């Protein structure tokens, strides 16, 4: 069962609220709390879009930039041993650590060579 929806790069987790007998979504990749409700897939999709458009409108009225779905920056903590192995692998591949990690993750997620 699919438990997420996407709209222009924004991802919402979908859950069911038995108290009101409706599904609801919570946008996961924005720092602002953005929610929406619907009793069908079609209603959820429409309310997701409506909520995002309202969010953009409020941001504009307040003079602030909306959160980007993803910045392209990704930071993780590793053990020194794994960090060293990654650095060695990158060096052997003739790539920077950043490029090697990016290529490796892309290959893992997308199945690209």
Image (cartoon, rainbow, N blue to C red):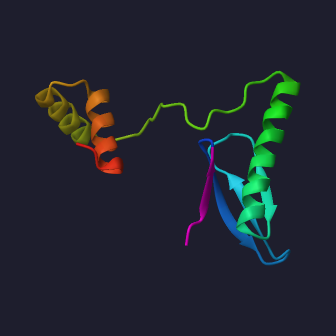
Residue 55 in magenta?
no
User: Between 8 and 35, which is closer to the camera in this rendering?
Assistant: 8
**Residue 97, percent from left and from top:** 27, 28
Give the residue displayed 60% in from the left and 38% down from the top: 69
Asked whether residue 2 is drawn in magenta, I would say yes
Image quadrant holding the C terminus, namely top left
Q: In which quarter of the image is residue 55?
A: top right
Asked which quadrant contains residue 102, the reply is top left
Q: What stretch is highlighted in magenta?
A: 1-7
Q: Position of residue 93 (x, y in %)?
A: 14, 30
- Is 30 left or right of 70, judged from the image as shown? right
Q: Is residue 93 left or right of 68 when viewed as pictured?
A: left
**Quadrant of the image containing the N terminus:** bottom right
On screen, residue 67 above or below 110: above
Q: Which residue in the rendered view is the most extreme toward the top?
A: 63
Q: Residue at x 67, y 41 (%)?
A: 30
């Amino acid at each position: 069962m699919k438990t997420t929806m996407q709209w222009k790069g924004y991802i919402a987790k979908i859950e069911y609220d038995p108290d009101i007998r409706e599904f609801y979504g919570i946008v996961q990749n924005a720092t602002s709390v953005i929610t929406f409700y619907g009793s069908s897939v079609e209603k959820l999709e429409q309310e997701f879009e409506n909520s995002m458009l309202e969010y953009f409108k409020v941001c504009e009225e307040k003079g602030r930039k909306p959160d980007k779905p993803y910045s392209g920056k990704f930071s993780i903590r590793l053990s020194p041993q794994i960090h060293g192995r990654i650095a060695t692998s990158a060096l052997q591949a003739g790539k920077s650590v950043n490029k090697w990690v990016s290529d490796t993750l892309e290959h893992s997620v997308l199945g690209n060579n």
